[in-house]
Image (tube, grey):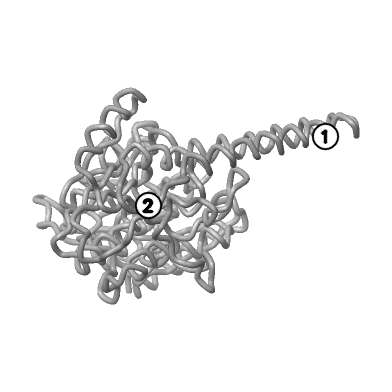
Amino acid sequence: MSGPNSVLITTPAALGANSENKRFFKECRSRLTRNERYFFNAKIQMIQRLKATLLKIVTNVKPNPFGKQDIKSIVILRYDRIGDMIASLPLCKALKLGLPTARITMIASTVNACIAEECEFVDQTVIKPSQLLNWLWMLLRLRAEKYDIAIDLNHAVTPHTIFAIRILNPKHVASPFKDGRWGVKGTELRLFDLMPPQHALEYVRPISETYLDIARLIDCPTQNCLPYPLRKHACPPQIPTHYVVLNPTGSRPTMRLPDTDLSTIAEHLLSLNSLLHIVIPAMQSDYERLLSRFEVIPQVEVLSPSSSIKPLLPVIQYAQCVITPDTALVHIACAYGVPLVAVYSADEALFHQWQPYLNPAATVIRTRDPKGLSGYSLADLLSCITAELR
């Protein structure tokens, strides 16, 4: 579902902001009198109607006749998290198999661009600038490419991608089935002329399958597009013969394995095999603390922080096992078929979309907390680790 960092316009920070906004409005309502609450709600509804009207105006474009044989260039907007990019790669493969002469351009974020570059089915990767004026200038330059299809992979109505697509001015716009948001349903926006109907399971299935619905709609083959098509790497030099990746941190601050549990897991791993090495990826904020905790155990190596996840790809590819909270490392392990023990929150909706997919060597531990890792069974986690390594 995400990598060690998040940037730019949407993603975890924006989602957190939305959550904070909801709590703020709820608290405001609780302090209002009945009449004040009525006018407060009326004002919110008026703002939503204005947003919906504006979106309908902006997206009120005349659709062009679609011919698969005419598609020569595709641009995909995926400037968010690492896990989102990995889950989008099967769609890139399906499009390239079904439209082999089409050139695929990926608009990525600084944190997930390296994943697009690792995929042989993406022809060009461009990074979305953080400054608004630079972003507008990039969109205007890309507009000159005259793309046949632009793909917005958000499954909700998302104004910032809609405005970006209007500047790009492609002949066609594709999207997964979009839920209603901002007071408007996705099906009400004429801009999206290539939108599959909602699946019978809705979103109770892996998110990659939701993205592949676009390929199915335009008759591109999807049968052999999974597991995630990441490039294979040569084995890094000086890497231990037998090692496990123990990742302490997920995509949110609440998705973190406690330090005491990390120590217990490390001790358990070494009790199973005293020759085993343990590799711990570290964020900058955790590096010194983890280094101090494990400096007396020579078999444990705390990796220096990196601004890119790219150096971790071969480390994960050749690991005997990956132990991690729900984060991008889950999907990288699935891409390489590496044995995996993953800890997920109790949020069922997110689990259905972001579960380990098509990795028969994956085991999942669930917590009791829908927002974080509190309440999982350490004993069950250790038992699953033992089963994976024996």
User: Does 106 sit left or right of 120 as displayed?
Assistant: right
Q: Secondary structure at mark 1?
A: helix
Query: In the image, what residue occupies the spot 34% across and 55% down?
Result: 64
What label does residue 373 carry, if any?
A: none
Question: Quick check: 337 above or below 9?
Answer: below
Label 2 Cα crowd, 10 Å radius (few <14 / some 14-19 / many 20+):
many
Question: In the image, is residue 321 above or below residue 7?
Answer: below
The local secondary structure at tag 2 comes to helix
Residue 30: mark: 1
Q: Is residue 385 above or below residue 375?
A: below
Which corner quadrant holds the C terminus? bottom left
Check disc 1 and give the amino acid type: Ser
Task: Residue 275: tell me if it is visible.
Answer: no
Image vertical order of residue 40 relative to residue 166, above or below: above
Residue at figure coordinates x 43%, y 54% from the top left: 192
> Who comes first in sequence, dot 1 or dot 2?
1
Give coordinates of residue 264: x percent, y percent.
Answer: 44, 53
Residue beneath disc 2: 84
The answer to whether residue 233 is visible is: yes
- Distance from the alpha carbon under mark 1 to that under mark 2: 37 Å
Find residue 153 and report its horizontal and vertical position in percent. 39, 53
Q: Nearer the viewer, residue 218 or 389?
A: 218
- Disc count in the image? 2
The three-letter amino acid code for the residue at tag 2 is Asp
